[in-house]
Amino acid sequence: MSEKALVTVRNLTHIYPGSSGKRAVDNISFSIREGETFGLVGESGCGKTTTGRMLVRLLDISSGSVAFDGQDITALQGKELLSYRRQAQIIFQDPYASLDPRKKVKDIIAEGIDIHHLASDRQERDEQVSRLLASVGLRPEHLTRYPHEFSGGQRQRIGIARALATQPRFVVCDEPISALDVSIQAQVVNLLKAEQRLRNLTYLFIAHDLSMVKYISDRIAVMYRGRIVETGPAGRVYENPLHPYTRSLISAIPLPDPEGERKRRRIPYVPAEKEEGGTLVEAEAEHYVWTS
Amino acid sequence: MAESVLDVRHLTVSFSTYAGRVQAVRDISFSLGRGETLALVGESGCGKSVTCRSIMGLLAKNAQVEGGEILFEGKNLLHLSNRAMREIRGGKIAMIFQDPMTSLDPTMKIGRQIAEAVRLHRPVTRAAAKLRAVELLEMVGIEEPEKRYHQYPHAFSGGQRQRIVIAIALAADPRVLIADEPTTALDVTMQAQILDLIKDIQKRTDTSVIFITHDLGVVANVADRVAVMYAGRIIEVGLSDEVFYDPRHPYTWGLLASMPTLAAKDETLYAIPGTPPTLIDPAPGDAFAPRNPWALEADRLAEPPLFPVSETHAAATWLLDARAPHVEPPENIALRAQAFRKKLSERSAAL
């Protein structure tokens, strides 16, 4: 991992279309270093998925900016946007809804190869697809099958192969394991980590499962109601949570330890009436907390 | 253990499908003590939900109960008429489902939905049912219950809706509450509140709970006893402490080892290899054997019985047979046991 920021987000905001003017994501800033995993945690509706989708330009950026490797991608159009999308891919949460049921696995995986013309002929395309399939742990006979013939874990592997097909540098992993069974979650997380090491990938890992986020991430940001309330190195945020919301969230994670669960004291979080005009303040090295 | 309220004996259920006969539940036995919470844990397709649907008499049309009995108050529920079963279902045995939005009627005020459940099982007037509904809303922690009685489900958050579903389940003072992944659709902080609510109600009413989940953290929080299911069978059962700190089945080892702990940051997570088997014509022997690094020759030949480990703890693995070679559990499982023994000795030293 290098110190160089690959993705830099400044004052990013998403306002829902319509008259309500509600800010799904409200003026957030962070950067993701090349080769690291940046975890984004928070509860449903906090804006984490919206953030991930803006970063790969699947959702409009209402205001603020996103820079990728020094280039401002906020308003890219046409060919330039296409070229950005080759480098920035996304893995979706629901492996049942994100694969086209009428396409064979090899054509699903090759979608990016076709769109970006990454293979010069049919044979090269097939070779690339076969290599990707093998690297995510599927077998050659799976190539000509359809998504409905696979289990949830296998489908997520197909989704990962599809994302890796364009040889991206940055991948948004939007809750990639939360729809999977426990014994399969570990397989997929290990696969993501192995591919990251092999290809020097940079991940934005979005999840609500805090123990898994801590495990996989180098740094994390905690989101609440569209804002980042705390961000820092993964270990520090868990060992020394500074924002009351982070404390509440950590105190609510059930752990596979009955003795600990019996002694557990949950910390409720009561949001302050008005938290306008606050800012992130560095409390210890690289560890920031929202302070109003 | 306290007197048992519900006894499932040798339950075997299969489904006819186009692909063949799926043996979803294979010879399952357990009993549920009074006021006790038993967690049924396992992955999708392991048979935990089918087991509970059998108890509720809610199996799909293509299901066949091939054998066994479910004893409740001296009767075998599998032999009851539809009419008699309707009395018990939602009455003495109630169920909470995973998704509160699909178990509530979006076109009906929530108060009426609760009052309806009250009147279904008790001969009371409308006015009395309404009073009881308001009381139930208050019991499950809905503020301003009189006012909210008149609102529709869409006006409530996910967590509040699950509270309302719980209120409906409690309407007839059930003796047994079956909770099928009741917190899976909720956020962690909401989940924590709902788990507290279920435990609190249980303490006050002495209800017995069967809690179905795939989340071992939730199990550790709610369960007195745990039954781990795999491929339609119970492969390990015991007191919560026994299963979490002294697990004996390699599948239980794998499940526990594949969860990251907040303390450790290992390079690679332990992952159980492969995927669960299909239950159409399962191969002879132990269904877990193909994924089991500790599998013995015996596992491929015959299905292991449940070997007793203690009075309350048993596991279905040939590793517990007297003739089996001695096997050390993986390191982090051994560490769990060590840490627990240390805690116990500290506690007894303090006494």
Image (cartoon, rainbow, N blue to C red):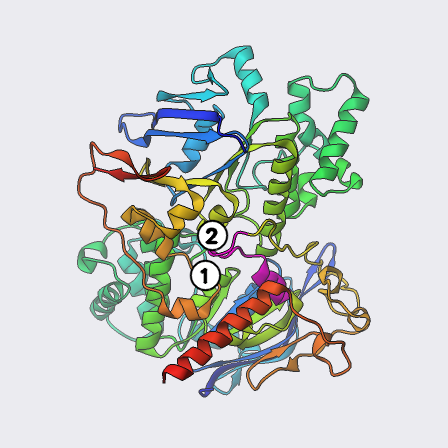
Q: Which residue is at the front of the view, A51 or B271?
A: B271
> Dividing the image into 4 quarters, which one contains the C terminus of chain B?
bottom left
Residue type at mark 1 is Leu
The residue at the point 48 percent across, 46 percent down is A213
- The chain ID associated with circle 2 is A
Circle 2: residue type: Ser
Whether residue A168 is situated above or below residue B312 in the rendered picture: above
Disc 1 on helix, strand or loop? loop
Residue numbers of the magenta segment: B251-265
Q: Specify whether residue A189 is painted magenta.
A: no
Q: Badges 2 and 1: C-beta atoms under 8 Å apart?
A: yes
Query: Between marks 2 and 1, how big is the CA–CA gap?
Result: 9 Å
Which residue is pictured at 50% across the width and 57% down the height?
B261
**Residue at horizontal 64%, vertical 43%?**
A191
* Residue B124: quarter of image: bottom left
**Rendering coords of residue B203 (x, y %):** 33, 76
Chain holding disc 1? A
Residue B104 percent across, percent down from the top left: 38, 55
Q: Nearer the viewer, residue A176 or B101?
A: A176
Instruction: Give the image location of residue A141, x and y in percent.
Output: 80, 40
The residue pinned by badge 2 equals A211
Q: Earlier in the sequence, mark 2 or mark 1?
A: 2
Name the residue that disc number 1 marks: A255
Q: Is residue B84 visible?
A: yes
Taking A129 as reference, is B184 left or right?
A: left
